[in-house]
Amino acid sequence: MQKQDLPLQQQIEAVIFAAEEAVTLHTIRSITGKNLDSGEFHSIIEQLNAEYTETGRTFQIHRIAGGYRFLTRPEFSELLKQLLAPRVRRRLSRSILEVLAVIAYNQPVTRGEIQQIRGVSPDYAIDRLLLRGFIEVCGRAESPGKPLQYGTTTDFLDLFHLSSLKDLPKLREIKEILQEQEEQDYLTRPDGIETALSGNNQEETIHEHEKEQ
């Protein structure tokens, strides 16, 4: 069967399902060859989501990071956290996640400003975050030497399932996530329980002034 013989709704569904990141309307138009306007596209998405709800599916199509992708329904979050948490930990260590949080809440921000906030060099974390595509250079500061400034990318929004930076969680929630991650790391290590009981766990924290945000 040729592409033009397939129902447009199914084409859109297949593209979003197969994509590894949020799919934009521009991409949908390019792949399907249909010059959809935003109203037509949103109507198709609403129809698909209505069908998923009526048939008791566990997922919906959501607008994320300027595009669209499949996400499971909120009531399954606790169940899937056990599956997804190890994957996020492999992507981002605690120290890198802290640097990412500083950038997200203070962007645009320079390396020097990040070091001033955290008290340690952010060079390794910044290099890893640039490599993963979660941050990018977004300009130069108007200060001596004109150091580079960093900000988050759409990949960052996609990783945390955010529509925009306005949806960032409170810093208190970020710290709770970090604490939960640290506890899980200890409990999954062979010596984790002994280490936790011995009281040798030294917690890293995000700089005090971030609490005020």
Image (tube, rainbow, N blue to C red):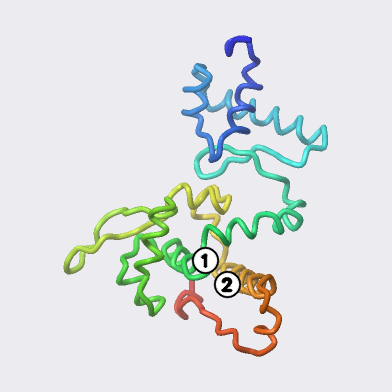
Instruction: Tell me the distance, in whole angstroms, between the alpha carbons under discs 2 and 1.
Output: 14 Å
Instruction: Choose mark 2 or mark 1, whichever is in front.
Output: 1
Q: Position of residue 86 (x, y in %)?
A: 63, 59
Residue drawn at the location 69% of the way across and 55% of the way down:
83
- The numbered mark at residue 93 is 1
- Residue placed furthest toward the left: 144
Q: Residue 165, relative to residue 191: is it above or below?
A: above
Circle 2 packing at 10 Å, graded few (<14), some (14-19), many (20+), is some
- The numbered mark at residue 116 is none
Kindly identify the amino acid type of the residue bearing the numbered disc 1.
Ser
Residue 100, image quadrant: bottom left
Residue behind mark 2 = 175
Foreground of the two, 32 or 105? 32
Residue drawn at the location 72% of the way across and 40% of the way down:
59
Left or right position of 117 against 155: left
Q: Position of residue 53 (x, y in %)?
A: 78, 36
Circle 1 packing at 10 Å, graded few (<14), some (14-19), many (20+), is some
Do the numbered discs 2 and 1 sit on residues whose CB atoms are within 8 Å? Answer: no
Q: Could you tell me which quadrant the N terminus lies in?
A: top right
| Disc 2 secondary structure class | helix
- Residue placed furthest toward the right: 55
Q: Residue 109, relative to residue 160: is it above or below?
A: below
Q: How many marks?
A: 2
Residue 14, image quadrant: top right
Q: Position of residue 148 (x, y in %)?
A: 26, 60
